[in-house]
Image (cartoon, rainbow, N blue to C red):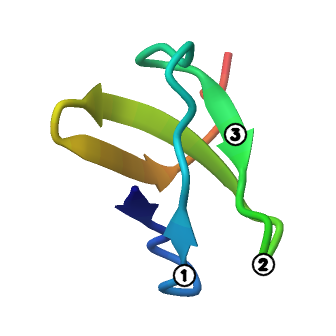
Amino acid sequence: MAKCPECGEFVKLLGDMEIGEIIECDTCGVELEIISLDPEKIKIFEEEEK
């Protein structure tokens, strides 16, 4: 489990998820990007400007 940087609640990462995948926090709804699977780490997703 990884902790949401926005609200502090734990977010469960499923076994088939990949680095770079975008998920949503069930508690606060913020979009999160998976940056590591071992250990599990996530960050707030920031869309790249083109």
Dots 1 and 2: beta carbons under 8 Å? yes
Tell me: 29 left or right of 31: right
Where does the C terminus fall, quadrant-wise? top right
Relative height, residue 2 to residue 27 (above, below): above
Marked residue nearer the N-terminal end (3 or 2): 3
User: Quick one: 22 or 40, which is closer to the camera?
Assistant: 40
Element marked by disc 2: loop
What amino acid is found at the position of numbered circle 3 in the picture? Ile
Residue named by callout 3: 23
Q: Quadrant of residue 7?
A: bottom right
Report the mark closest to the observer, 1 or 2. Answer: 1
Mark 3 vs mark 2, CA separation in Å: 12 Å
Task: Name the residue beneath numbered marker 2.
Answer: 28
Do the residues under discs 1 and 3 have CB atoms within 8 angstroms?
no
Q: Residue drawn 40% across and 48% down?
A: 42
Up/down of 2 relative to 47, above or below:
below
Q: CA distance from mark 1 to mark 3?
A: 14 Å
> Horizontal and vertical percent for residue 46?
59, 44
Q: Is residue 18 above or below residue 41?
A: above
